[in-house]
Amino acid sequence: MPTHGKLRLGVNIDHVATLRNARGSEWPDPLRAALLAEAAGADGITAHLREDRRHIRDADIVALKAGIGIPLNFECAATDEMQSIVLATRPHAVCLVPEKRTERTTEGGLDVAGDADRLRDFITPLREAGARVSMFIGHDPRQIEASAAIGAAVVELHTGHYSDLHAEGREAETRAELEALIRGAQLAHSLGLEVHAGHGLTYANVAPIAAIPQVKELNIGHFLIGEAVFIGLGAAIEEMRRRMDAARA
């Protein structure tokens, strides 16, 4: 059984770019947000380069890779275009996510079990280039086992359904979903995968996820950027860090 070591916080700065793009200007700058997050104690920066470039742009990825002193986690779909960008940019980590043009945000986990051969071939050059490859998946044991089988180093468990149930006050269903996430984290750890989690996490719901001992990193974005409007990005991150650490203790 792993110990309750320090839990890493990855800050997703996509929606700083969403705000910038809404006005068609150069402000606010995602790199500046990333540097503020680093100064506030973030352990990594996550940025999702979507096919339609709705928030993060190619130039943002280049600037982030060059400008920050903590690891860059590059989220993307498993497409030829994104593979080329990863190989040119060489981020610390690559998290593969499902992506649909019509979705507002990532709606579920990747179907690794149903696309194992293609994904194994897709991640091979990324691994050879030194990137730690993560699969963004649900807690289904089939998807966890398939992620291990194709050679992923990490799985990031999708906490969106848990977060939605928690927000709706559906206590029994929230507990059941949390228990499924715990079992998923235990299985992934037993297969040699590093376990991350993220999607929809807030001050109100982060503690039970942070307390799962096999989880080594949480990736949180939309809530922190929203909270930053009211209290500033540094303060928002520091409060999330405090709550994560308290749950871990």
Image (spheres, grey):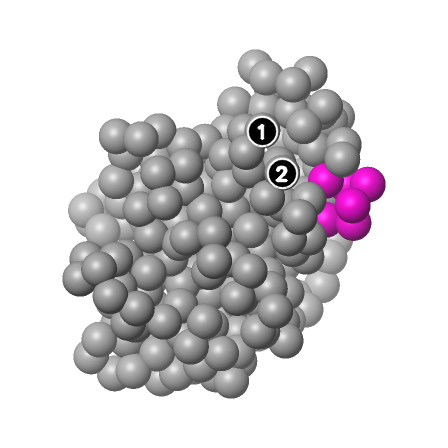
Residue 188: name its quadrant.
top right
* Percent position of residue 46, x then y: 50, 58
* Percent position of residue 237, x then y: 41, 76
Q: Work out whether residue 225 or residue 205 is closer to the camera in this orientation and state it.
A: 225
Residue 220: name its quadrant.
bottom left
How many callouts does the rendering have?
Answer: 2
Give the quadrant of the C terminus. bottom right
| Residue found at x 39% / y 83% | 234
Residue 27: name its quadrant.
bottom left
| Residue found at x 22% / y 60% | 24
Amino acid marked by disc 2: Ser
Name the residue beneath numbered marker 2.
84
Q: Which mark is residue 50?
A: none
Read off the magenta span: 126-131
Confirm whether residue 237 shows in the render.
no
Confirm whether residue 234 shows in the render.
yes
Q: Specify few, some or many for label 1: CA neighbours under 10 Å numbering under 14, 14-19, or 20 or more.
A: few
| Residue found at x 27% / y 44% | 164
Name the residue beneath numbered marker 1.
80
| Residue found at x 55% / y 37% | 82
In the depicted structure, whether residue 108 falls above or below residue 17: above
Amino acid marked by disc 1: Asp
**Residues at marks 1 and 2 touching, judged by CB atoms closer than 8 Å:** yes
Q: Work out whether residue 171 or residue 73 is closer to the camera in this orientation and state it.
A: 73
How much space separates mark 1 and mark 2, taking CA atoms? Answer: 6 Å
In the depicted structure, whether residue 113 falls above or below residue 7: above
